[in-house]
Image (spheres, rainbow, N blue to C red):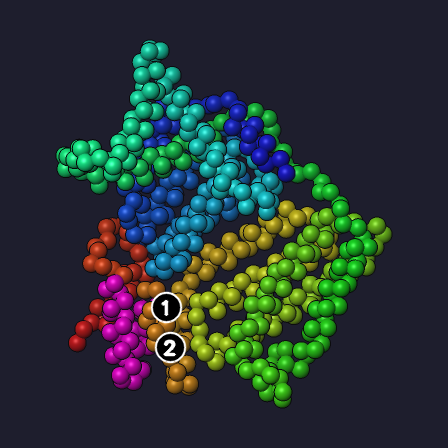
Amino acid sequence: MRVRSDAASASSGAVNGDPRLLWATAAAVAGFGTWMLYDALPGINWVLWTGAAVAGLLAFSRPRGHAPRSVLIMGAPIAIAGAAAVTASPGLWALICLAVVFFLAMQMLLAAGLSPRSITARFAATAPLVALRIAAVQAMRRGVEATHLIRSTRARAWVRGLAITVPVLVGFALLLAGADPVFAAWREAVGALIGWEFVPRVVFFMALLVVVLGAYGYASIEPGSPPAMEGKAPDRWLGSTERFILLAGVAALFWLFLAVQLGYLFGNLPRIPASGMTFAEYARRGFAELSIVASASALLIVVSERYGNDDGRERALRLLTFAVIAAVLVLLGSAFRRVWLYETAYGFTTARLYAQVYMCAVAVGLAMLSREVAGDFDAGRLFRRAAATTTILFIALIYWNHEAWIARRNMDRYASTGKLDVAYLTGGLSPDAIPAIAERLPALPEPMRSDIRSAVREQSAAREDGRQRTWFEWNLASSRARQALNASFAAP
């Protein structure tokens, strides 16, 4: 791919637009982000700032005629950031943050004129680091260019010198204060005079300003040369004979495995005499290995198609490839079944649910792979389709309150099995599950009901820590959890 060279040519192109407008917009977005995000709990603040950042990026790229043309790339960061106000799960917050950063980086790179066809696995894997590097370089350039607005050469040199020297002196002085009592006393005196609590906020603002300024500056550049739309043809280093042996061997192994397990593949292994494996071992150990085999097989087929020759064996190689894909789909079905059996016997957890979602995503990817194998194989197109499907699936997952569903299923199981993992129910789930727990709580007997009520109340108090939310920290899941706590978990 020529993604890096295209980005380099764009970054070296002509600068367009009013630098004053660029600086004012970047400072406003960075200031808005500092107000909304610094030391704030996730809520509607995430989607408000993400929307502002995306709007600014589009505003500076559209006049150049190269705004991102992918609706998914433009809308995904806003849609994903909105989920931060819907869920109260810290784990999902982390995934949402990473996903928003990833899509903003993708949008920034595409805003310089790259085609959505430039999106490949390599492009996506390096996008956040490449975007950060380009943004830092662009911010430095814009900082240097800003000094040109000062007409006096001598004054310009003083501004640059102070901008470089002051942060260095402050950093060194703070370090030396830890080694000398006089410097330490001066540090305390300055801290008492102005207060040090503003320093982290200023650092956060400056970091955000660098990223936003660099991104907007990069989007406003006129590319020096038209970006390449397609990558060069891959080297076909895998011969047809090697491909035939590889695919035939894998297909034979998979179908042999399926034949051996035919009697219990979708059943209950412990019912078979002398199996040597308990039900728990069968259900717990199998799905991880089968999922890894399925994922690795999909990657193997992609490598075979992208870097392999057919040399007149196209029909035979295609049949072998389909044989492997069919076997892998059956293996995925078996893995999904094992997780389901384990959930039925031991209860539902987020990890088990995520494993099932992952297997469904792999199955969809294999269906897309089959379509590519049947036609003219294009690895980049396959990746883009699979990535789009995965993004849509991820958005659906983070908006779906699956933890509440897990809580309901586990509490409903108690009526038929008499078993309930109270520790996981009250400590392993986020506040997303509290309304569902409150809904099913009256059906549980004492003293279990009182134990759950006390544990949920203690966990919630530890999470809140007496903190009051501001209006932009409003969160739907947290609001519902507080209502359920006040209604069903109040101390007697």
Q: Is residue 373 visible?
A: yes
Q: Residues within 10 Å of mark 2 (few under 14, many from 20)?
A: some
Q: Quadrant of residue 374?
A: bottom right
Residue linked to disc 1: 428
- The CA span between labels 2 and 1 is 10 Å
> Percent position (x, y) of residue 396?
46, 59
Q: Is residue 270 above or below residue 67?
A: below
> Which is more toward the observer, 159 or 111?
159
Q: Helix, strand or loop at disc 1?
A: helix
Residue linked to disc 2: 421
The prevailing secondary structure element of the residues shown in magenta is: helix
Q: Residues within 10 Å of mark 1 (few under 14, many from 20)?
A: some
Where, quadrant-wise, is the N terminus in this rendering?
top right
Q: Is residue 334 above or below residue 41?
A: below
The kind of residue on which mark 1 rests is Gly
- How many numbered marks have been drawn onto this rendered protein structure? 2
Query: Is the C-beta separation of discs 2 and 1 under 8 Å?
Result: yes
> Percent position (x, y) of residue 227?
60, 32
Q: Which residues are magenta?
A: 433-462
The kind of residue on which mark 2 rests is Asp
User: Is tag 2's residue or tag 1's residue first in the polypeptide sequence?
Assistant: 2
Q: Is residue 268 visible?
A: no
Q: Is residue 436 left or right of residue 189?
A: right
